[in-house]
Image (cartoon, rainbow, N blue to C red):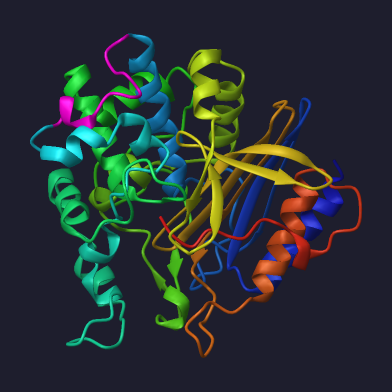
């Protein structure tokens, strides 16, 4: 692990267009932390490696671990119909066909609710062009989980229950949050805090209770594929729109600590971890295909090995965390810009210099000592919560 090379790669991401980027890399007891760029483009305040970040869908691994703990206690069965627990939320035949496992691995066929909660992101006959208006409209809106779940359930199905490839959906993980509340008698956020976050020994990870991030953090700039130019700061934002799907705030040190302890069998049992690592093909919200387990991604990186973890974005914040299967090599990277790619004539995101710089950083951080060819890297930055 060469600190100079890692810092140079981090600086490359900043030069390519990310205002501020910070990371922690671990390798068999060695720890490197670095930062490059600014936390505030207006004041020039520098970004720091210990800053807090909205980590988006990394939250899904925490929620999945909480569910597996309840499986171990016998209160939930992975292959039980969700309708057995939540008949009011998922009634009828759908509730009988969709299992807890299908929610966890995104094969339920229930579509994502994001485009319904943010209607200006959809093209319709009355609004033929997308716009960022909904992002501002919802900044302080307090959504209820049942409201968002209903949006997902009433949208056209993404597939049949159990069908592969599955379709990545935040609706699944809001349902899992409601399932946790049903079987534990407390809110999902409280249960996850006491039994996952505190068990992992995390000191800077929490579900925010309001629109502000507590502690040192960066502003978070959203570009929305060029629709917001210059990118707008959404660091003050009510996270009721994602909660148990993508609502956590954390640090790169805490995220690395969590995944290391999860893969060491300290958060769930080894048999539960084996269930989490049973993957199926799933189509992500950006159209890419991923190997998805129960709240976990699997990445096979030539020259580096097999890694487990998750990516995540919310408005203005992008995060990636990966841990090698043996637990010895870890990388967590945070950026204060999201959706920087502008579309081509077909409407698909164009490759940006940031993508190449990130591919270089990721492979350096994961221990690839050979030539780094960014265009061949299997990792792409996340583009959806």
Q: Is residue 236 above or below residue 17?
A: above
Asked whether residue 90 is in view, the answer is: no
Q: Quadrant of the N terminus?
A: top right
Determine which quarter of the picture holds residue 92: top left
Q: Is residue 37 above or below residue 1?
A: below
Name the spot of residue 223 as percent of width and height, x first. 45, 74
In the displayed structure, does residue 36 sit left or right of residue 78?
right
Name the spot of residue 67 as percent of width and height, x first. 35, 24
Name the spot of residue 220 as percent of width and height, x first. 44, 62
Magenta highlight on residue 103:
no
Name the spot of residue 97 as percent of width and height, x first. 24, 36
In the displayed structure, does residue 211 sit left or right of residue 146?
right
- What residue do we see at 20% from left, 26% from top? 181
Q: Is residue 12 above or below residue 186?
A: below
Q: Quadrant of the C terminus?
A: bottom left
Asked whether residue 298 is in view, the answer is: yes
Give the magenta part as a residue range: 74-86
Q: Is residue 249 above or below residue 355?
A: above
In the displayed structure, does residue 218 sit left or right of residue 307?
left
- What residue do we see at 22% from left, 82% from top? 124
């Amino acid at each position: 692990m060469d600190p100079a090379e890692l810092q140079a790669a981090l600086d490359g991401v900043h030069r390519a267009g990310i205002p501020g980027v910070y990371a922690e890399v671990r390798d068999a007891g060695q720890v490197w932390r670095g930062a490059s760029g600014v936390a505030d483009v207006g004041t020039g305040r520098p970004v720091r490696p210990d800053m807090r970040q909205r980590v988006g869908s990394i939250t899904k691994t925490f929620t999945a671990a909480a569910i597996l703990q309840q499986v171990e206690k016998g209160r939930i069965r992975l292959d039980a119909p969700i309708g057995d627990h939540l008949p009011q939320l998922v009634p009828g035949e759908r509730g009988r066909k969709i299992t807890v496992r299908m929610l966890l691995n995104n094969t339920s066929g229930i579509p994502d609710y994001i485009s319904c909660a943010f209607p200006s992101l959809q093209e319709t006959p009355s609004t033929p062009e997308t716009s960022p208006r909904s992002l501002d409209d919802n900044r302080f809106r307090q959504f209820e989980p049942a409201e968002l779940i209903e949006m997902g359930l009433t949208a056209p199905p993404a597939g049949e229950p159990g069908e592969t490839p599955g379709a990545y959906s935040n609706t699944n993980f809001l349902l899992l949050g409601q399932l946790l509340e049903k079987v534990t008698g407390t809110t999902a956020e409280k249960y996850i805090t006491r039994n996952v976050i505190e068990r992992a020994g995390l000191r800077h990870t929490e579900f925010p209770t309001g629109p502000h991030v507590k502690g040192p953090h960066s502003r978070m700039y959203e570009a929305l594929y060029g629709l917001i130019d210059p990118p707008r700061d959404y660091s003050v934002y009510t996270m009721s729109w994602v909660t148990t799907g993508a609502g956590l705030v954390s640090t790169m040190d805490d995220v690395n600590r969590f995944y290391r302890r999860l893969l060491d069998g300290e958060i769930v049992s080894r048999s539960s971890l084996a269930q989490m690592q049973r993957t199926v093909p799933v189509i992500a919200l950006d159209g890419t295909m991923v190997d998805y387990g129960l709240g976990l991604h699997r990445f096979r990186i030539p020259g580096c090995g097999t890694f487990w973890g998750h990516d995540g974005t919310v408005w203005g914040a992008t995060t990636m965390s990966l841990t090698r299967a043996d637990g010895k090599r870890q990388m967590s990277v945070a950026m204060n810009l999201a959706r920087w790619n502008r579309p081509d004539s077909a409407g698909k995101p164009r490759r940006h210099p940031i993508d190449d710089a990130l591919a270089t950083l990721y492979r350096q951080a994961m221990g690839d000592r050979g030539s780094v060819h960014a265009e061949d890297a299997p990792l792409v930055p996340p583009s959806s919560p």
